[in-house]
């Protein structure tokens, strides 16, 4: 079961997954994102935030170049197991 897996991974001193969070589209509610990150960490996961996660540009979550850079980085990092979008 998942609780047993979490206990086993923690006893080995490593997180279950290393999850990158990026915002490739619209801005998001910061409080909700932070609550989600805390939940993932409570479950034993390690969370990596995109370098431009909190950027804003017009009605987007940063410039197109910065959003693309964060997404490309998250998708190509060998130490990241999963990529989550902050919104949409």
Image (cartoon, grey):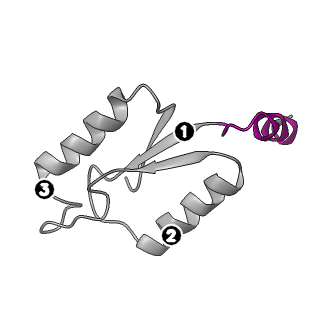
Residue visible at 42% across and 25% down in the picture: 78
* Magenta segment: 3-16
Q: Label 2 near label 1: C-beta < 8 Å?
A: no
Depth order, front residue of 22/49: 49
Q: Is residue 26 above or below residue 83?
A: below
> Along the polypeptide, which appears first: circle 3 or circle 2?
2
Residue visible at 41% across and 71% down in the picture: 29
Task: Tell which tag, 1 or 2, sits nearer the viewer.
Answer: 1
Residue 15 falls within the magenta-colored stretch: yes
What residue sits right under mark 1 in the picture? Answer: 18
**Distance between the Cα atoms at labels 1 and 2?**
20 Å
Q: Position of residue 18 (x, y in %)?
A: 54, 39
Q: Position of residue 8 (x, y in %)?
A: 83, 34
Q: Is residue 24 above or below residue 7?
A: below
Residue visible at 21% across and 49% down in the picture: 67
Q: Main secondary structure of the magenta part?
A: helix
> Along the polypeptide, which appears first: circle 1 or circle 3?
1
The secondary element bearing badge 3 is classed as loop
* Picture quadrant of residue 28: bottom left
What residue sits right under mark 3 in the picture? Answer: 63
> Along the polypeptide, which appears first: circle 1 or circle 2?
1
The label on residue 32 is 2
Q: Position of residue 55 (x, y in %)?
A: 23, 64
**Distance between the Cα atoms at labels 3 and 2?**
22 Å
The secondary element bearing badge 1 is classed as strand
Q: Position of residue 42 (x, y in %)?
A: 70, 56
């Amino acid at each position: 079961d998942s609780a047993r897996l979490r206990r086993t991974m923690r006893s080995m001193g490593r997180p279950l997954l290393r999850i990158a969070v990026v915002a490739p589209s619209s801005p998001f509610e910061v409080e909700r994102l932070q609550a989600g990150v805390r939940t993932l960490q409570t479950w034993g996961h390690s969370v990596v935030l995109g370098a431009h996660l909190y950027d804003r540009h017009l009605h987007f979550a940063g410039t197109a170049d910065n959003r693309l850079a964060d997404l490309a980085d998250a998708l190509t990092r060998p130490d990241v197991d999963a990529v989550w979008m902050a919104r949409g």
